[in-house]
Amino acid sequence: MMALLLEPLQFTFMSHALLISLVVSIPCALLSVFLVLKSWALMGDAMSHAVFPGIVLAWILGLPLATGAFVAGVFCAVATGYLKDNSRIKQDTVMGIVFSGMFAAGLILYIAVKPDVHLDHILFGDML
Protein backbone atom coordinates (compact mmCIF):
# COMPACT_ATOMS: atom_id res chain seq x y z
CA MET A 1 0.00 0.00 0.00
CA MET A 2 2.78 2.43 0.91
CA ALA A 3 4.69 1.62 -2.27
CA LEU A 4 1.59 2.47 -4.29
CA LEU A 5 1.42 5.90 -2.64
CA LEU A 6 5.13 6.63 -3.07
CA GLU A 7 5.42 5.36 -6.65
CA PRO A 8 4.35 8.66 -8.34
CA LEU A 9 7.06 10.54 -6.40
CA GLN A 10 9.73 8.71 -8.40
CA PHE A 11 8.97 11.08 -11.27
CA THR A 12 10.69 14.46 -11.03
CA PHE A 13 7.65 16.47 -12.07
CA MET A 14 5.55 14.85 -9.33
CA SER A 15 8.10 15.57 -6.62
CA HIS A 16 8.34 19.18 -7.83
CA ALA A 17 4.53 19.49 -7.74
CA LEU A 18 4.48 18.15 -4.19
CA LEU A 19 7.21 20.58 -3.13
CA ILE A 20 5.41 23.53 -4.72
CA SER A 21 2.12 22.63 -3.07
CA LEU A 22 3.83 22.36 0.33
CA VAL A 23 5.57 25.72 -0.08
CA VAL A 24 2.34 27.42 -1.14
CA SER A 25 0.11 25.75 1.45
CA ILE A 26 1.93 27.07 4.53
CA PRO A 27 1.57 30.83 3.90
CA CYS A 28 -1.97 30.30 2.55
CA ALA A 29 -2.99 28.51 5.73
CA LEU A 30 -1.51 31.23 7.93
CA LEU A 31 -3.18 33.99 5.91
CA SER A 32 -6.51 32.15 5.97
CA VAL A 33 -6.47 31.94 9.76
CA PHE A 34 -5.76 35.67 9.98
CA LEU A 35 -8.59 36.51 7.56
CA VAL A 36 -11.11 34.34 9.41
CA LEU A 37 -10.15 35.82 12.79
CA LYS A 38 -10.63 39.34 11.37
CA SER A 39 -14.02 38.26 9.92
CA TRP A 40 -12.72 38.88 6.40
CA ALA A 41 -13.30 35.35 5.12
CA LEU A 42 -14.77 36.65 1.87
CA MET A 43 -11.61 38.68 1.18
CA GLY A 44 -9.64 35.64 0.02
CA ASP A 45 -12.35 34.72 -2.45
CA ALA A 46 -12.67 38.34 -3.55
CA MET A 47 -8.96 38.67 -4.25
CA SER A 48 -8.76 35.41 -6.14
CA HIS A 49 -11.51 36.59 -8.50
CA ALA A 50 -10.40 40.21 -8.68
CA VAL A 51 -6.91 39.49 -9.99
CA PHE A 52 -8.25 37.92 -13.21
CA PRO A 53 -8.54 41.18 -15.23
CA GLY A 54 -5.04 42.14 -14.09
CA ILE A 55 -3.67 38.83 -15.32
CA VAL A 56 -5.36 39.23 -18.71
CA LEU A 57 -4.15 42.83 -19.05
CA ALA A 58 -0.62 41.82 -18.10
CA TRP A 59 -0.71 39.08 -20.73
CA ILE A 60 -1.91 41.59 -23.35
CA LEU A 61 0.85 44.08 -22.44
CA GLY A 62 3.54 41.41 -22.19
CA LEU A 63 4.19 42.08 -18.50
CA PRO A 64 4.73 39.47 -15.79
CA LEU A 65 1.38 37.99 -14.78
CA ALA A 66 2.17 38.44 -11.08
CA THR A 67 2.53 42.20 -11.63
CA GLY A 68 -0.90 42.41 -13.22
CA ALA A 69 -2.41 40.29 -10.46
CA PHE A 70 -0.83 42.49 -7.78
CA VAL A 71 -2.07 45.73 -9.34
CA ALA A 72 -5.59 44.33 -9.77
CA GLY A 73 -5.59 43.06 -6.17
CA VAL A 74 -4.55 46.44 -4.83
CA PHE A 75 -7.24 48.10 -6.96
CA CYS A 76 -9.83 45.67 -5.55
CA ALA A 77 -8.79 46.42 -1.97
CA VAL A 78 -8.81 50.18 -2.53
CA ALA A 79 -12.16 50.10 -4.34
CA THR A 80 -13.67 47.94 -1.60
CA GLY A 81 -12.43 50.30 1.12
CA TYR A 82 -13.60 53.39 -0.74
CA LEU A 83 -17.08 52.02 -1.37
CA LYS A 84 -17.41 50.78 2.21
CA ASP A 85 -16.39 54.15 3.65
CA ASN A 86 -18.53 56.24 1.29
CA SER A 87 -21.76 54.23 1.29
CA ARG A 88 -24.11 52.52 3.69
CA ILE A 89 -23.52 49.12 2.10
CA LYS A 90 -22.02 46.43 4.34
CA GLN A 91 -18.43 45.36 3.66
CA ASP A 92 -19.21 41.82 2.53
CA THR A 93 -21.77 43.14 0.03
CA VAL A 94 -19.25 45.65 -1.31
CA MET A 95 -16.64 42.90 -1.69
CA GLY A 96 -19.14 40.75 -3.56
CA ILE A 97 -19.98 43.59 -5.93
CA VAL A 98 -16.35 44.54 -6.58
CA PHE A 99 -14.99 41.04 -7.12
CA SER A 100 -17.93 39.98 -9.28
CA GLY A 101 -17.52 43.08 -11.41
CA MET A 102 -13.79 42.63 -11.77
CA PHE A 103 -14.13 38.95 -12.64
CA ALA A 104 -16.74 39.84 -15.27
CA ALA A 105 -14.38 42.49 -16.67
CA GLY A 106 -11.63 39.89 -16.84
CA LEU A 107 -13.87 37.46 -18.73
CA ILE A 108 -14.88 40.18 -21.20
CA LEU A 109 -11.21 41.04 -21.78
CA TYR A 110 -10.33 37.37 -22.18
CA ILE A 111 -13.09 36.79 -24.73
CA ALA A 112 -12.23 39.99 -26.63
CA VAL A 113 -8.52 39.16 -26.89
CA LYS A 114 -8.85 35.37 -27.44
CA PRO A 115 -5.38 34.48 -26.13
CA ASP A 116 -3.71 31.19 -26.95
CA VAL A 117 -3.68 30.30 -23.23
CA HIS A 118 -6.68 28.21 -22.18
CA LEU A 119 -8.94 29.76 -19.55
CA ASP A 120 -8.49 26.78 -17.20
CA HIS A 121 -4.73 27.41 -17.04
CA ILE A 122 -5.29 31.05 -16.07
CA LEU A 123 -7.96 30.35 -13.47
CA PHE A 124 -6.62 27.19 -11.87
CA GLY A 125 -2.96 27.09 -12.83
CA ASP A 126 -0.89 24.03 -13.53
CA MET A 127 1.74 22.83 -11.06
CA LEU A 128 2.92 20.07 -13.35
Image (tube, grey):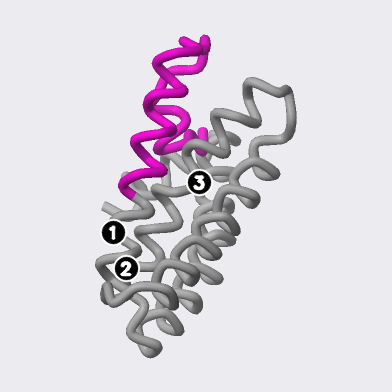
**What is the x, y in percent for residue 33?**
41, 82
Kind of residue indicated by mark 3:
Val
Query: Front-most of 20 and 124?
Result: 124
Q: Residues within 10 Å of mark 2 (few under 14, many from 20)?
A: some
**What is the x, y in percent for residue 112?**
44, 13
**What is the x, y in percent for residue 23?**
59, 61
Magenta stretch mostly in which secondary structure?
Answer: helix
Q: Secondary structure at mark 2?
A: helix
Discs 3, 1 touching: Cβ within 8 Å: no
Kind of residue indicated by mark 1:
Gly
Q: Residue at point 28% right, 59% down?
A: 96
For the magenta stretch, what is the residue range?
A: 100-128
In the image as oriented, which residue stretches furthest toward the bottom? 37
Q: Residues within 10 Å of mark 1 (few under 14, many from 20)?
A: some
**What is the x, y in percent for residue 52?**
47, 39
Q: Residue at point 52% right, 39% down?
A: 10
Cα separation, mark 1 vs mark 2, equals 8 Å
Q: Which residue is mark 1?
A: 96
Q: Secondary structure at mark 3?
A: loop
Query: Front-most of 19 and 6?
Result: 19
Q: Which residue is mark 3?
A: 51
Q: Which residue is mark 2?
A: 42
